[in-house]
Amino acid sequence: MNLSKEVYKEFKKYPEKILQFGEGNFLRAFVDWKVDKMNKEADFNSGVVVVQPLENGLIDMLNKQDGLYTLYLNGIKDGKVASEHSVINCITRGINTYTKYDEYLSVAENPELRFVISNTTEAGIAFDEKDQLEDRPQKSFPGKLTALLYHRYKTFNGDKEKGFIFIPCELIEKNGDKLKETILKFIELWKLEEGFKQWIEEGNTFCNSLVDRIVPGYPRERIQEINSELGYEDNLVVEAEPFHLWVIEGPVWVKDEFPTDKVGLNVLFVDDMTPYRTRKVRILNGAHTSMVPVAYLYGIDTVREAVEDDIIGKFTKDTIFEEIIPTLDLPQEELEAFANAVLDRFRNPFIKHELMSISLNSMSKFETRVLPSILEYQNRKEQLPQKLTFSLAALIAFYKGERNGEKIALADDAEILVQYESLWANYDGSQGQLKTIAETILANEKVWKMDLNQVVGLTDAVTAHLVKIQELGMKKAVLGVMN
């Protein structure tokens, strides 16, 4: 018996007030959980219509379960080990723009629609000049969104009362500003009228936001046990930690329309989210991203195993305390307290957070989460951080696509994968070829937003680490950068 509205007797259908781009684990365990809580406890009365931004996704499965799924919150809560679960009932339907584009556009005709929320990874808010208004659908997320906004503009004759509140969750700096900027680029590319541009700028509110919750996702290994406990089958079970933080930078009145405070959620509405973002991205996400290639090539598969391992655990902790925290400007005590909390969250006994799930789009993640620490460390210390540069070399080795003779299921932009495949295919075992690989990757300005070969000493440092990783293996190579 599958989870459905027939099984979940408390099922309720809410008016669609939220348009959500992304049906993945994070949004369902973070945003939709909050909406569900506000619906049940604060009469928010808002349904979420979910758009699948990519051609392949979970929308069909979500629709089969009437938008329902079970969320498990497992971890340390108020100092105690806790596990609780609930059925999330706020998603009204899912739409695949690749098969139901007209249905997608018609969402814009709903006068009650008020919020647009998204999480399309760091690479998602990008301008693709190949997108055209006539495409069905446009390839990029902002392209799809601009087409929908134009349809709404025309449907309501430019009524500024029918604008949206945008709260993107992509982990890029000033994500709301970036989304607005990209939409305006499409308006210019498509030569749309000035009135539409004015409607975007004056009738819509773009918030910047920062999200924080570890979401391992679908508990594949214990799903039979879970289904037995629940008494129904749920193909969309998602697991997350109890901790959550959402920092939203925008006008104070947004808080009145999105009443998270009424149900005790850890959502902060602020004038400037910069200190929160820098701390979280550099420490938590930076630790995740710098850990992945090192730990995975070491032979470890999960975050918890990594931080509990004598070598990789020390590598990770030392990276945070010795190379990341020194690049930040908040009080030392506050930074160390946050870092220790992060390590405790990584040790959550309930969470099996696969390193491979974090490895999705690792190149753009490294540029966003880790590279700033490398550059700032060099700026302040006048030398390169050993462990972070080692992690960059490990990332290049990771994209060779094999571990102990087994293929790694790399997931990144096609251009990046093609470049790596070509470089590693020509590897002849020589140190000279490894330097060529390092130089070529570091020169990729599309990824790094600069030529990293221009950073004093970086090419030589990365090459030296890469040589050791290839010649000695990760288990011996990592010891060379340990204190």
Image: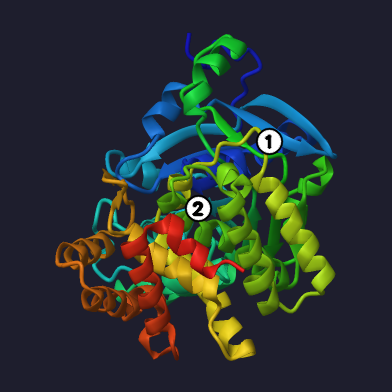
Rendered location of residue 261, percent (x, y): 81, 48
Three-letter code, disc 2: Asn
Front residue of 324/25: it is: 324
Q: In this picture, is 305 found above or below 150?
A: above
Q: Compared to 189, does 405 lie above or below? A: above
Q: Is residue 153 visible?
A: no
Residue 425, horizontal then vertical, whole percent: 16, 62
**Label 2 environment density (alpha carbons within 10 Å; few <14, some 14–19, many ≥20):** many
Q: If the image is split into quadrants, where does the C terminus sit?
A: bottom right
Residue at 28% x, 78% y: name it: 435
**Amino acid type at mark 1:** Asn
x and y percentages locating residue 132 in the rendered image: 26, 64
Q: Residue at x 35, y 76 (%)?
A: 463
Task: Name the residue at 41% across, 63% down.
Answer: 394
| Figure disc tally | 2
- Identify the residue shown where x is 76% and y is 30%: 82
Mark 1 highlights which residue?
45
